[in-house]
Amino acid sequence: MIFLGQGEPCGLGGVVPLSEIAHSIMIDLSEYPRWLVVLGGTVVAVVVIWILMKLLKLTLWLLLIGVLIGGLVWAGWELMQ
């Protein structure tokens, strides 16, 4: 749980303000060359888009198989009636 402000201390050392957590997560990229930061961001974006494309392809295959099986079962049910 993330606490904002004062609260009861917990067993792991107390309440940590949200601003302290956000401050500790920040990464300072100002020491790196600007082109390297842009290149790294581009590579990360391409990898994320590629993973999303693969997940979408898998989802569409599962949907296609589900519709095919559902249609066959429905047609079989109608045949038995």
Image (cartoon, rainbow, N blue to C red):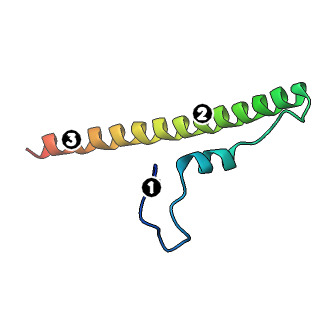
Question: Distance of mark 2 from mark 1, alpha carbons?
Answer: 44 Å
**Residue 45 picture location, percent across and down:** 70, 31
**Residue 20 picture location, percent across and down:** 61, 50
Please, what secondary structure does the residue beneath circle 3 have? helix
Viewer-nearest of labels 2 and 3? 2
- For badge 3, the amino acid type reads Trp
- Quarter of the image with the N terminus in it: bottom left
Q: Could you tell me if the residues under marks 2 and 3 are in contact, i.e. CB atoms within 8 Å?
A: no
- For badge 1, the amino acid type reads Gln
Residue 69 lies in quadrant:
top left
Decide if residue 72 is on the left or right side of residue 58. Answer: left
Residue that carries the numbered disc 2 in the rendered image: 53
- For badge 2, the amino acid type reads Met
Residue that carries the numbered disc 1 in the rendered image: 6
**Residue 13 picture location, percent across and down:** 56, 70
Please, what secondary structure does the residue beneath circle 1 have? loop
Report the residue at 42% width, 59% height from top: 7
Viewer-nearest of labels 3 and 1? 1
Residue 57 lies in quadrant:
top right
Residue that carries the numbered disc 3 in the rendered image: 74
Please give the count of numbered marks on the rendered protein: 3
